[in-house]
Amino acid sequence: MMMSYLANTAHLQFFFLVGGFLAWILTTTTTGLNEWRLWYLNDTSIVTSGVAWVGIWRACFYSHVLTGVEFCQYMDLTQDFVPVEVSAAQVMMMMAVICGLAANVSGATALRMAYFSVRGRSHLGQLFVLAGSLYICSAGLSLVPVVWNMKSVLGNSTIEFPPQFHLPAAPLRQQVGSAIGLGVVSSILMLFSGLVFLSYPYVQQTKVREKLEINEHKICCNKKNSPG
C-alpha cells in the first residue's frame, strides 16, 4: 500500500526534476554566455561591428582591424577594473551551478527511492527536503547576480576597461543581453522545482509523524516519572 501510495504521488516531483535539470542546463549556459550586456559604440574604427558583448568572464566584439574576426579579452577577480557585480556574478553563478547539480542528484535519488525502494525509506523525507532546499539555494544564487547586473545595465553603469580591451568606459547606450533573460527563466524554474519538492506529501507526513512520536515519548516519560 505504501509503495503504491508513494509512486502515485511522486509524478509532479518527477516532472519538476526534469524541469530542475533543464534549469540547471540554462544556469550553466547563462554562466558561460558573453551576452550579459550589449554595448553600442559610436567609434567603429576598431569595433567594426559597432557593438560589444560584455559577459562576466570576458568582453568580445567583431573587428576587421585586430587579429582574428572575434576579439576577446578575459576578466577575473584579480583585476581591479572589474565591477563588484561582475565579480560577485563569477562566484555566485558557479555556486549556483554546483548547488543545481547537487539538487538534481538529491532529487533523482529521492524519486528513485520513492518509485523503486520497498525498504530503507526512513530518510526519504530528508532527501526531498534536501533537494528542494538546494534548488531554492541555486535559484537565489543565480537570480541575485542576474538582477544586479540587469540593474547596472539599465542604469548605464560604466566599466573602466584597460587599453588592451579597446573599449571605452561608457558606451553610447547599453542593452540587457540574452544571458540575463535566460538567467531569470532558469532561476524561476529552479525555484518552482524547489517548492514542489518541499511540498511533497510524504515530507509533510514525516513531519507530523515525528511530532507525534516526540509527544508520545514525552507522555511515556511523564508517566514513568509520575509518583505512584
Image (cartoon, rainbow, N blue to C red):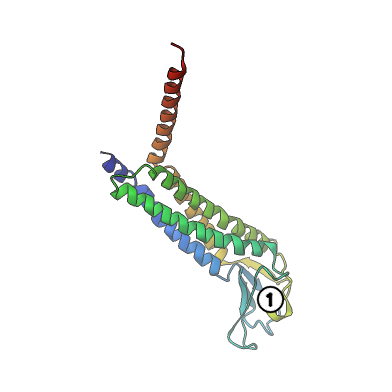
Quadrant into which the N terminus falls: top left
Task: Report helix, strand or loop for mark 1.
Answer: loop
Q: In the rendered view, tell whether residue 198 sits above or below residue 109.
A: above
Of the pair 170 and 109, the residue shown nearer to us? 109
Residue ranking furthest to the top: 228
- Across and down, in percent, residue 127 comes to 42, 47
Name the amino acid, label 1: Leu
- The residue tagged 1 is 41
In the shown orientation, is residue 114 left or right of residue 85?
left
Instruction: Measuring from the top left, give residue 43's x and y in whole percent.
Output: 71, 80
Above or below residue 115? Residue 28 is below
The residue under the point 71% across, 64% down is 157
Number of numbered discs present?
1
Q: In this view, does 32 lie to the left or right of 50?
A: left
User: Where 52 falls versus 63 (above or below)?
Assistant: above
Residue 175 shown left or right of residue 117 in the figure = right
Specify whether residue 15 is in view: no
Residue 71 screen position, x and y as percent: 61, 82
The picture quadrant where one finds residue 208 is top left
Q: Is residue 19 left or right of residue 30?
A: left
Q: Quadrant of residue 20?
A: bottom left
Q: How crowded is mark 1: few (under 14 residues within 10 Å), some or many (20 or more)?
A: some
Q: Which residue is drawn at 72% across and 67% down?
A: 158
Q: Position of residue 95 (x, y in %)?
A: 55, 59
Q: In the figure, 225 relative to 194: above or below?
A: above
- Work out whether residue 81 or residue 113 is closer to the camera in this orientation and state it: 113
Is the C terminus in the top left, top right, bottom left or bottom right quadrant?
Answer: top left
Residue 75 visible in the shown view: yes
The residue shown at (66%, 81%) is 47
Of residues 210 and 46, which is closer to you in this image?
210
